Image (cartoon, helix red, strand yellow):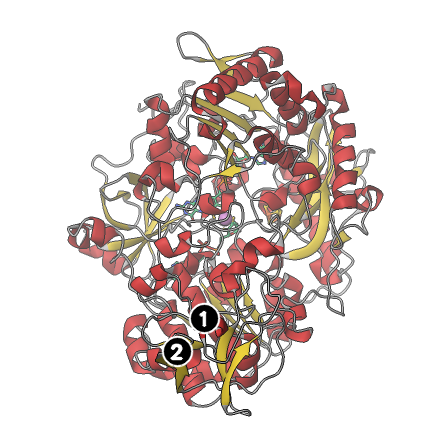
Amino acid sequence: MELPDISRRTFVATTAVAAGGAAVGLGVAAGAQPADALTPAEPLGGSWVRTTCSPNCTGACGIEAWAEDGQVRLVRQAADYPYEHYNPRGCLKGLSFNTIQHGPDRLTTPLIRDEAGNQVEADWDTALDDAAGRLRAIMDKYGPNSVGVIYQVQGTGHIQKGALVRIANTFGWSVIGGYELNGDLPMFWPETFGCQSEELESYCWEDSRLTLIFGSNIMVTRMPDAHFLTYSQEAGGKVIYFDPNYSASAEKADEWVRIAPDSDGAFALAMAKVIIDENLYDAHFMATYTDSPLLINGETGKRILADDVAGLSATPGIPDYRSSFVAFDEAAGALAAVTPLELPDNSFALTGTYDVPLKDGTTVQAKTGFQLLVERLADYTPEAAAEICGIDADDIVRIAREAATVKPMHIIFGGGTQQWYHGDLKGRACALVACLTGNIGQLGGGISTYVGQYKTRFNTASWMVPPDAVKASCPFHYAVNGPTPLMKATYPKDGFKALVVGWGNPLEQHNVANWLREALASNDIECLVCLDFQRTLTVAEATVALPCASWYEKTELTTTPLHPWVQLQQRVVDPPGQAREEIWILTELADRIDPAKEAVWPRFAPEDSEAKADEVLALLLREGGPTINHLTPEMLREGPGKLAHANPGEKRIPFWEQVNERIPFPTVSRPNPLDVTSKFVRSGRIEFYRDEDVFLELDEQLPRYKPPFEDTEYAADPAARELYPLGYTTRNSAFRVHATYVNDPFMLEMQDNTPKVWLNPATAAERNLKNGDWVEVYNSRGTVQGQLVEDPGVYPTQCIFDQGWWSHYDNGTSYNSLIWPWINPTNEVYYLVSVWSPNMAWNETACNVRLCEGGRPQVVTDTGKSILGDGAGAASPIEYGKEA
Ligand SMILES: Nc1nc2c(c(=O)[nH]1)N[C@H]1C(S)=C(S)[C@@H](COP(=O)(O)OP(=O)(O)OC[C@H]3O[C@@H](n4cnc5c(=O)[nH]c(N)nc54)[C@H](O)[C@@H]3O)O[C@H]1N2
Ligand SMILES: Nc1nc2c(c(=O)[nH]1)N[C@H]1C(S)=C(S)[C@@H](COP(=O)(O)OP(=O)(O)OC[C@H]3O[C@@H](n4cnc5c(=O)[nH]c(N)nc54)[C@H](O)[C@@H]3O)O[C@H]1N2
Ligand code: SF4
Ligand SMILES: [Mo]
């Protein structure tokens, strides 16, 4: 459509005002205005404040909000990014946030338990003393690390959320990082590149000429950035999308490959085979930057150390996180020690078998890593992979040739592909394709993953790590599964006895939710302190609930991995009722737990919270290091600031220094110093060969294909193969960010207020189910209910449920009750809190679907009004699961 006289920015800004106007009428009680009064750019006097939408979404969209009578009335896109293609950003969720900010589920008063255990309102002094007293008692009895801290992804908040990290480090509480709770970090990153992740910012997508997307539903889950893919298509680029299910992203792609669930790894390995067999690979890249030439001992399966070889020795002076390995130098016709300190051009052989004389007098046969890879790939002919993936071999060959010849080529490796038990094997296979084609370190090329707003992009220690910090951490997996032989985390001796939760809703959102609910009910977890601005189930079950400021009610600093902007959430209105900024709440809590901590947590009055946040903001910018220390608070109050990067040009290029300046891998994974993570790639190179014992035992030293469920569901219960023949996909919803916005009336209306279960028509027919039936998805662990949608786009072996419905919308069932936190032992090798950990594999869940006897039960609120199916949205207060 042509819009001759209207720029993209004006068009969307106008639309946004209209949407905001509607929000006033529908969601906000007081002061409704006729829509036409709200259309001028500067409505009704007053002014717009520049802030940032900040749910656990990669968007971090710049927003302007306009307030009246202490409430946010209008919200529109700020559209002030200096790089024009970022304008505007935002979605209807963000633009109607005021409906939940001022909606019926808003938490405005502290809540505590009375003697009978009922939740009652309290003043701040009482609630804070209660929380502090309980936490102190538990710390004294079981040790400080028995207090577990759950906070979501770091990027959405470094000041207020940073205060939660600071208090954990003050007392030595166990940080239960967001990554392991979410499964957000694809484990192939540390396994291959030694770092947390390195992705293209979305404005580099427009520079790609071929984009292969594996299970990342960009059009839905990267809504404000999705147009960058369209720009690449407009510039002649091609987008190929791999997903078992037809999604919004499949629709926009040039080609949709309907790949069998969990089979992406086989596809990528077959591509690698074609690229090598047809000699389309970048041999210089593989020899210079990867471990391909390094020799592997044929007897032990381990890489050979230069120090063990007769006549060779390690590079002098290497740090203990580095090793010198051995290659065969073709120019010299001899074995050579390989330096891990630089990445020089070389004449190392990529293939071959060599006799290696060792210092102990024996000789071993060794092959290069690349040789072993070529041998492994013999199993992945296009025909063999086609069988596994359920597609044509010709398509694999064609796409492999395109991937090798069209440059720059970019692979997006999504949550849908990663969040399986063997997600790491698939990622290693995809990374191999990115390297074979020489796309790493190139603008618009390489491999990226975009999951949550997880990435720390500057140094945050000045605020989050106080003097005398005690750092502890432990993933929740070990509370549920019990400690494992390869566990690297320190498990609290009596387990977790208290939880402090902020910015998260673990009683709904996590596959430990069932376990958590039971642990609370049995008093195994004795205390749950929750900081939220909404009355979630985690708040409803809390021992002490502390009402917080939402992101239009405080100063907070945000960054995302998806774009280069550093932004502020700014206060548009005061927090309502008793709600307070977290920085004040946590200061009070720290001082009440231990008055001696006042030196680290100087007290201030609640009305000085903004001034305190400003102080921390200045500190973070000043001490944040070279990516951020050119920015000042004043600049950020005006609009977005851009992170600095090392490469020339406007856009940051991942691994530019490694490829162009030959600086060894890995890149830094904040908040850890480089020497902590460097040991994951001891050669200083990209490593496709892993020789840790657990990889050798599982035959995963090189990427390979392993089928779903065999090592998890079917191993735990062989009967599951017949009882639960479907895979359970809990994809992210267009209408929520996880559970946030679940109670937004606009979003509810668009979903007919009803959770849905999607099945292929054939799968439904096998079960005598039809469109509109109220059905139950089940396995041995749990059930969830919803209304059936027959959708031919769904893969016949899959059942889809859009994650993020609060359980009271599902008749009290929980979509997460079916899922188990499996621990893949290879992931444990790379345990490091807040960077990578044993990961969640949401998709690794077998299930079945049946009709709900008696149709859909009516769930009612205690005001007698149905919260389901009447178009009214959520009413409040709500009694969970109470049936009419
Ligand atoms: N609107 C919205 N946006 C969000 C979020 C949200 O909740 N709502 N959450 C944010 C966060 S924190 C995250 S982690 C991301 C996650 O966002 P994504 O990375 O996009 O992950 P999912 O939505 O889980 O799945 C994407 C697709 O993977 C497909 N899939 C499932 N199994 C496989 C498989 O084996 N292979 C392939 N190729 N595809 C498969 C699914 O059918 C689905 O279409 O989204 C972020 N953005
Ligand atoms: N089955 C299944 N489960 C999943 C996933 C899946 O794919 N399938 N995906 C997982 C992933 S990738 C993720 S990232 C998680 C997300 O899980 P969560 O982030 O726990 O999900 P939300 O329900 O959005 O919870 C965020 C909570 O933080 C609160 N909050 C937001 N901003 C603030 C603030 O400024 N201050 C305070 N105090 N509170 C605030 C919100 O009100 C909300 O209650 O879910 C995971 N769960
Ligand atoms: S919900 Fe996400 S995409 Fe929508 S406006 Fe907010 S940050 Fe942007
Ligand atoms: Mo996530």
Is 157 placed above or below 13 here? above
The tag earlier along the polypeptide, 1 or 2, is: 2
The residue that mark 1 highlights is 688
Where, quadrant-wise, is the C terminus in this rendering?
A: top left
When asked about the image quadrant of residue 865, the answer is top left
Q: 884 or 487, which is in the foreground?
A: 487
Q: Pointers 1 and 2 in contact (CB under 8 A)?
A: yes
Tag 1's secondary structure? loop
Is 766 placed above or below 265 here? above
When asked about the image quadrant of residue 54, the answer is top right
Where, quadrant-wise, is the N terminus in this rendering?
A: bottom right
How far separated are the C-alphas under marks 1 and 2? 9 Å
Q: Amino acid at mark 2?
A: Leu
Label 1 CA crowd tier, 10 Å (few <14, some 14–19, many 20+): many
Tag 2's secondary structure? helix
The residue that mark 2 highlights is 373
* Horizontal and vertical percent position of residue 508: 42, 35
Left/right placement of residue 222 relative to residue 879 reads right
Label 2 CA crowd tier, 10 Å (few <14, some 14–19, many 20+): many
Q: 482 or 675, which is in the foreground?
A: 675
* Horizontal and vertical percent position of residue 269: 39, 75
* Horizontal and vertical percent position of residue 410: 55, 71
Q: 718 or 57, which is in the foreground?
A: 718
Is 170 placed above or below 762 here? above
Q: Amino acid at mark 1?
A: Phe
Left/right placement of residue 623 relative to residue 589 reads right
* Residue 208 appears in the rendering: yes
When asked about the image quadrant of residue 409, the answer is bottom right
Left/right placement of residue 774 relative to residue 315 reads left
